[in-house]
Image (cartoon, rainbow, N blue to C red):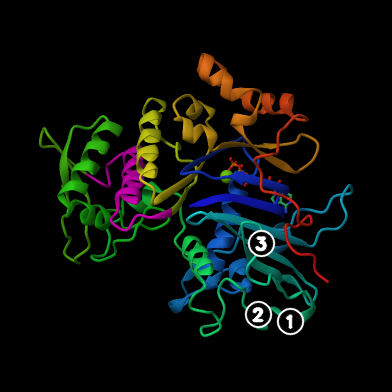
């Protein structure tokens, strides 16, 4: 399981750490930096998949001219934190991700800087792994190599085939955790489309929903779980699903209600499709690893939100799935269980500086005690979390964050 994400000079974060749990909730106002956190995970994901830095930062066109991977949001010079008068010039960013292995904690660190030879390009400065604070793999120091992007050396995490030692477990673990991350941002319009038989991986926008649900329904137990959650989450009295084929062989989705009424994906409501998307992602046979859902509550009625939380808490408690979600809705706090509460952070942008900070809500303003004594419902008005944050600024306790006896970047100093 991933345990932490630390961002140094990445977008609007100077040096902030997000604590991760089985189910992590990131709450914050518009433009506070929630999606910037997702971008950092996307960066790690594509590095883990073995893409070059130029592909990760600039996007990749696959076979047939189709966009295989969209570049990290923003122009290249917007990925490194903006320079500001009060700061020395910053021309590099670092991302550190913590992973719990059996009894140890591994951290993968990547530091990337502008390429002096290419105004739109980046180059590796260093990357490496430490276990329980000790570097295990000589943090690669590429700063002096000054290679151009096209010959950019491969990071430690994904060396050329043949360059890795087979017993290098930590690296393999880290890589498989980053590789398997999924980023889901549902688009009901794309979920309504029929799918091609055999396409049973849910797309990032929810594509292939019919075939993924069909494969879940092929297993009686998983079908039962799907149906019972679906019935709870929507006001529909559902009996099952049908997956008719059209003349060209594509698979469609139809929801069958107990009164015999059939609702096609084309006419199902947006919220219904979003629920189905979440269920398809979490109940799928191959479900495992980290799922990042942008705005999980989007389009979901407030009185169903607690069920959605319950679903994710139960699925993540089983241990092989980890979920991270962003939300604008502090009302979610009212229903979350203790573990989710401990892994909920607020992202807050200072009014005067563009930078944002990330704070576990449990550390704010005695929130943990308040929650036990009174419940949080009465507090969850608009802007309340941000006010609580301002009030507790200054006496914020950073003990839970990663040990910090490294330099400011969390890595060995470069020569
Ligand atoms: N390199 C950078 N340096 C400083 N700030 C940046 C940088 N790049 C982006 N930002 C800031 O990050 C903000 C966008 O953050 P993000 O998209 O993560 O917000 P969000 O919390 O997801 O908002 P929403 O809820 O509206 O989706 C921009 O308004 C911009 O000010
Ligand atoms: Mg966003």
Q: Is residue 308 magenta?
A: no
Spatial CA span between label 3 and label 1 = 28 Å
In this figure, which residue is indicated by the disc labeled 2?
A: 153
> Which badge, 3 or 1, is on the more N-terminal residue?
3
Q: Where residue 159 appears, x then y in whole percent?
A: 57, 78
Residue at 58% x, 20% y: name it. Answer: 369
Of badges 3 and 2, the one in the foreground is 3
In this figure, which residue is indicated by the disc labeled 3?
A: 134
Q: Where residue 242 appears, x then y in whole percent?
A: 16, 49
Residue at 67% x, 79% y: name it. Answer: 152
Can residue 38 be seen in the rendering of this structure?
Answer: yes
Up-down: is 3 above or below 168? Answer: above
Crowd rating for badge 3 (residues with CA inside 10 Å; few <14, some 14–19, many 20+):
few
Q: Using the rendered view, name the quadrant where residue 31 is placed.
A: top right
Q: Which residues are magenta?
A: 264-289
Residue at 58% x, 54% y: name it. Answer: 98
| Picture mark count | 3
Do labels 3 and 2 touch, CB within 8 Å? no
Label 3: which secondary element? strand
Do labels 3 and 1 touch, CB within 8 Å? no
Q: Nearer the viewer, residue 322 or 62?
A: 322
Spatial CA span between label 1 and label 2 = 8 Å
**Quadrant containing the C terminus in the rendered view:** bottom right
Q: Is residue 274 magenta?
A: yes
Spatial CA span between label 3 and label 2 = 24 Å
Residue farthest toward the left in the current orientation of the protein = 260
> Which badge, 1 or 2, is on the more N-terminal residue?
1
Q: Nearer the viewer, residue 246 or 255?
A: 255
Can residue 184 be seen in the rendering of this structure?
Answer: no
In this figure, which residue is indicated by the disc labeled 1?
A: 147
Q: Using the rendered view, name the quadrant where residue 344 is placed.
A: top right
Do labels 1 and 2 touch, CB within 8 Å? yes
């Amino acid at each position: 399981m991933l345990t932490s994400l630390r961002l140094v000079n990445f977008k609007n974060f100077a040096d902030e750490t997000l604590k991760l749990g089985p189910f992590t909730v990131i709450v914050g106002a518009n433009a506070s930096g929630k999606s910037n956190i997702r971008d950092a995970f996307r960066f790690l994901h594509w590095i883990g998949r073995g893409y070059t830095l130029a592909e990760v930062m600039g996007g990749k066109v696959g076979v047939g001219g189709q966009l295989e991977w969209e570049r990290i949001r923003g122009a290249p010079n917007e990925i490194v934190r903006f320079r500001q008068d009060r700061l020395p010039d910053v021309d590099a960013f670092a991302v550190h991700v913590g992973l719990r292995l059996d009894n140890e904690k591994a951290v993968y660190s990547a530091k990337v800087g502008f390429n002096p030879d290419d105004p739109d390009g980046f180059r590796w400065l260093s990357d490496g792994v430490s276990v329980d604070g000790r570097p295990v793999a000589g943090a690669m120091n590429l700063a002096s190599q000054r290679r151009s992007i096209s010959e950019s050396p491969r990071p430690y995490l994904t060396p050329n085939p043949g360059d890795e030692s087979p017993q290098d477990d930590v690296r393999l673990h880290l890589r498989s955790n980053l590789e398997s991350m999924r980023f889901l941002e549902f688009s009901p319009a794309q979920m309504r489309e029929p799918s091609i038989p055999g396409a049973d991986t849910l797309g990032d926008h929810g594509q292939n929903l019919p075939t993924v649900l069909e494969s879940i329904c092929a297993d009686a137990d998983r079908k039962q779980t799907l149906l019972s959650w679906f019935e709870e989450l929507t006001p529909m009295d559902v009996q099952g699903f049908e997956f008719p084929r059209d003349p060209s062989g594509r698979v469609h989705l139809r929801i069958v209600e107990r009164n015999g009424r059939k609702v096609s994906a084309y006419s199902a409501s947006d919220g219904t499709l979003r629920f189905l998307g979440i269920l398809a992602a979490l109940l799928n046979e191959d479900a495992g690893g980290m799922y990042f859902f942008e705005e999980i509550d989007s389009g979901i009625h407030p009185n169903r939100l607690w069920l959605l939380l319950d679903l994710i808490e139960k699925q993540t408690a089983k241990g092989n799935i980890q979920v991270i979600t962003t939300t604008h809705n502090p009302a979610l706090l009212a229903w979350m269980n203790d573990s989710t509460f401990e892994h909920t952070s607020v992202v807050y942008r200072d009014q005067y500086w563009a930078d944002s900070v990330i704070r576990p809500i449990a550390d704010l303003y005695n929130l943990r005690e308040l929650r036990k004594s009174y419940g949080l419902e009465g507090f969850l008005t608009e802007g309340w979390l941000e006010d609580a944050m301002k009030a507790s600024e200054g006496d914020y306790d950073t003990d839970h964050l990663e040990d910090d006896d490294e330099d400011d970047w969390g890595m060995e100093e470069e020569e």
